[in-house]
Amino acid sequence: MYGRPRIHHVPSEDLLAGALPVGRFVHGLRRMLQEEPTLQRQVLRGEVGRWTRARSGHVYLTLRDDDGSMDAVMWSSRAPPQDFEEGAEVIVLGSVDVYPPRGQLQLSVERIFAVDRLGDLEAQRRRLIEALRNEGALDRARRPLPFFPKHVAVVIGAGSAAEADVLRLSEDRWPGLRRTVIGVLVQGEGAEGELVRGLEAAAAMADPSVAARRGNPPVDVIIVGRGGGSTEDLWAFNLEAVARAVLRMPVPVISAVGHEVDVVVTDLVADVRASTPSDAVERLVPVRADLVQHHDELEARLSTASMRRTHEARQGLLLLRHRLAAAPTTGFTAATRRLDALTGRMSRATEARLRQQQDVVNNAGQGLKRNVDQRLTADRARLAEMDAVLRSTDPRKVMERGYGMLHADDGRLITSVTQLRAGDALMVRLGDGQATTTVDRVEGGEHDG
């Protein structure tokens, strides 16, 4: 016994032509979600409902709270080294995505950290920032980066992708740039000490004497940082010893920690903050090809400007030649008039100067004559006074009044009878001549009688 035959509805050709493959639809939905800003890079809080780490290193988890839950995935490049227990309260940074093979809506998580741990660490970070602010470390003048760095020290995770990016990008931008990579531990136990030692090694290479012994130019800028990670992974850059090591550096420091959610303390104390190590290279190292091109452009502009100025100078010279050829007499006449005017001005100035100097000489001569006359008058008065004194004391004037002077025959002046003896020959000097006499008798003195 046969049943009733089934009737199949065949779709129309238009319907078939307009049907989308499901994979294409899912990928279109994924693009729409990725382009919606309100669904990307959202900070969410919840607790871990499931945590599974695959052999590939990917982590699959569920985030939940009292009102809902959502599956999430952390790819191996972003997964934290430690696992979270079920029920742990966490904060994540993630974006809504679709897993095309299953058409599954999920959250792609970039970073995750525990709420309790974050609270303790954040309190420490804020206390350190406040202490540094009170010391004035956050308000200090920032040192500018060198325009052409000669030697760059890079303190970064040893063998990390960030190190490879820095070396590749700096070599692409300026081939042959001297770089010294100091590989250190940038997270976990011991990261603080290694970062400090790495910075101290970079500071030593900035010493010119140390650099000379090594045969290298001194380090003139330091990059310290790492690639992205969770807040806890980046915490070494929030520690006081690392921050103070950055403050001690003798050359400019770029803090290049790959993060966007928060600011680490090294960002606050460094001279320049970069969002990633690659960004630090782009800020520091110029593109040699661009500079060469700019140099070539400047050289071409200089050449063009020189040719233009030369052409303008030649045109000016030709114009002057034409003007001189067209009006030589006019130019000569004008020059003669100028020469005559200058000659007249010089003659008048010379005569005025001579008259001025003659007046000075005349005034000086009159002053000199007055001074000489005054001096002669004063000297004549003094001579008259001296003559009067000499005349009043001249012995001849006394003798003219009847006095005389007695001299022994040997010329001695006789001033006392004690000098005389009877029979002494004497010369008597009078006012108008002299006479010779002989002592007959001496009276007075010890010869009296």
Image: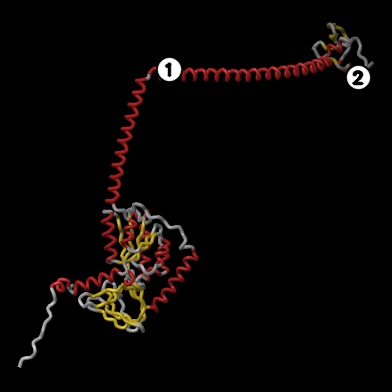
What is the spatial separation of the Cα atoms under label 2 and label 1, in whole angstroms?
Answer: 117 Å
Q: Which residue does the image show at 32% across and 65% down from the upper left?
A: 156
* Residue 41: x %, y % from top left: 33, 71
Report the front residue among 20 and 55.
20
To which residue does mark 2 refer? Answer: 446
Vertical order, 20 against 249 (above or below):
below
Can residue 290 be seen here? Answer: yes
* Relative horizontal placement of residue 17, taking residue 375 as reference (left or right): left
Which quarter of the figure is the C terminus placed in? top right
To which residue does mark 1 refer? Answer: 333
Q: Mark 2 belongs to which amino acid?
A: Glu
Report the front residue among 402 and 175.
175
Q: Mark 1 belongs to which amino acid?
A: Thr
* Residue 5: x %, y % from top left: 8, 87
How was this image coloured?
A: secondary structure
Report the front residue among 409 and 382.
382
Report the front residue among 223 and 248.
223
Q: Which mark is residue 405?
A: none
Q: Which residue does the image show at 12% across and 78% down from the upper left?
A: 10
Q: Which residue does the image show at 29% across and 68% down from the upper left?
A: 35
Vertical order, 307 against 110 (above or below):
above
* Residue 407: x %, y % from top left: 83, 12
* Badge nearest the viewer, 2 or 1: 1
Q: Residues within 10 Å of mark 2 (few under 14, many from 20)?
A: few
Vertical order, 310 against 392 (above or below):
below
User: Element under label 2?
Assistant: helix
Which quarter of the figure is the N terminus placed in? bottom left
Can residue 192 be seen here? Answer: no
User: Element under label 1?
Assistant: helix
Of the two numbered discs 2 and 1 on the same chain, state the one appearing first in sequence: 1
